Amino acid sequence: WQAEDLQGDAEQVTQIIRIDAHAPVLHWDREGEVALAGVVVLSGLAQDPASGVQAVAISLDRGKNWLDLPVKAADQVNTPRTSLWAFAWDTTRVPNGTYPLLARGRDWAGNWSGPAVWRVRVEN
C-alpha cells in the first residue's frame, strides 16, 4: 500500500502479515498406562512456535466437560513458545477403573489442538 508523508512525497511501505493456522502441540509428562491413587499431579507441556500458547484445558470425563488450566511460560525450556501446565486430581472422588485423560491447547490465534490422550488406571 502507499503512504504519503507530510510533504506529499509517496513512500512505499511493505508489511508482512503471518497467519497462524497451526494448533499447539501438547504432551503429557508421562506416557503409557500407569496406576494412580490419592491426589496426583497431572502435568505436561504445550508448544506453539507461531503465536504462543494461550490456554490449556483438560477433561477427566471423556471430553464431556473441560477444565481450563493456567499456563506458565517455561523459561528453563530452550524451545520458543513453550508453556507448562499442571492439575492436582483427587482420584478418590472417582470409581476405580481405567480413564482416558484428555488435554488440548489453544494458541493466541484461536487454533485449538486435538486432544492428547493419556490412559490411566485408578486404584484406590
Image: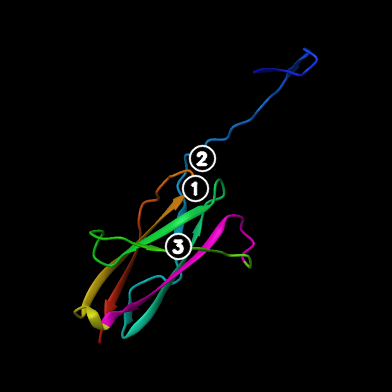
Residue 102 x/y as whole percent: 33, 62
Local SS, label 3 = strand
Mark 1, Cα crowd under 10 Å, few <14 / some 14-19 / many 20+, is some
Residue 27 - label: 3
User: At x 45% / y 47%, what residue is drawn?
Assistant: 23
The answer to if 78 sits in the magenta stretch is: yes
- Image quadrant holding the N terminus, namely top right
Residue 86 x/y as whole percent: 44, 71
Local SS, label 1 = loop
CA distance for labels 2 and 3: 20 Å
Tell whether label 2 touches label 1 (CB within 8 Å). yes
Q: Which residue is mark 1?
A: 108
Rendering colour mode: rainbow
Residue 20 - label: 2
The answer to if 47 sits in the magenta stretch is: no
Mark 2, Cα crowd under 10 Å, few <14 / some 14-19 / many 20+, is some
Query: Which residue reaches farthest front?
Result: 6
